[in-house]
Image (cartoon, grey):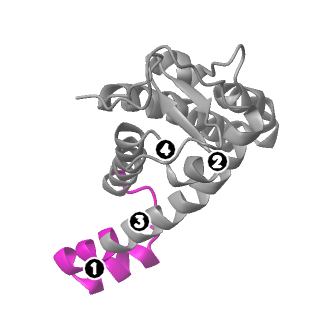
Amino acid sequence: MPRRFHDAEELFPPATALKRALAIIYDGLISIAVLLVTTWIYTMITGWIRGWEHMERMAEAGQLSGDPGLTFLLFLVLYLFFAYFWTHNGQTLGMQVWRIRIENLDGTSVSWTQSLLRYGTASAVVFLAILGGYYLGAVALILALPAIVALFYPINGLSVTDRTSNSVVVALPKQVKKQL
């Protein structure tokens, strides 16, 4: 059941691109820590199951890079991390610091499906930019930067991720207390 943050008639202004960018940087740093811990746990479990000698031989042969199981796990953990915050209180830790929130147009929390659409859109554009930069060189990555910026930069108050998930990122006034 969606959580109601405020009355449907009460409208908050869209979050500015600067606040969005600062929250993304903050959440990016937290995401790195989450991914490092997840990778460590995955490596420990894999080493225990396969045997440390086998893992050492694979590492020396360069066979540990590009593990599809780890890649899928990291994608899933990061989605669960963001979706949990978005569906429960509309704010990741970085969004709480910069007083912005993701919500539906009627002031309710987004669903897990909306979170998946939002996360999937962002992931796809960033993945294609990185892939293009890897295969086509730095020039392609530089040319892809406008697409990455457009992904999160709001035009008429809505970014690409807002449009695909049918939600909006709003700026919270100082007097609104954080709801748990």
Sequence-wise, the earlier of marks 1 and 4 is 1
Q: Residue beneath label 4, please?
A: 91
Mark 2 or 4: in front is 4
Sequence-wise, the earlier of marks 2 and 4 is 2
Q: Where does residue 28 sit, x and y in percent of width and height? A: 59, 54
Sequence-wise, the earlier of marks 2 and 1 is 2
Query: Observer-nearest residue: 79 or 107?
Result: 107
Mark 4 or 3: in front is 4
Answer whether labels 2 and 4 touch (C-beta < 8 Å): no
What secondary structure predominates along the stretch shown in magenta?
Answer: helix
Q: Quadrant of the N terminus?
A: top left
When the figure is inspected, residue 71 is found, relative to residue 15, above or below; the finding is below
Please, what secondary structure does the residue beneath circle 3 have?
loop
Q: CA distance from mark 2 to mark 1?
A: 41 Å
When the figure is inspected, residue 78 is found, relative to residue 139, above or below; the finding is below
Q: Residue beneath label 2, please?
A: 23
Sequence-wise, the earlier of marks 3 and 1 is 1
Sequence-wise, the earlier of marks 3 and 2 is 2
- Look at 34% across and 47% down and name the residue there: 80
- Identified by mark 3, the residue type is Gln
Q: Residue beneath label 3, please?
A: 63
Sequence-wise, the earlier of marks 4 and 3 is 3
Mark 2 or 1: in front is 2
- The range drawn in magenta is 42-68
- Identified by mark 1, the residue type is His
Query: Mark 3: few, some, or many residues within 10 Å (few <14, many ≥20)?
Result: few
Query: Observer-nearest residue: 91 or 29?
Result: 91
- Look at 49% across and 44% down and name the residue there: 91
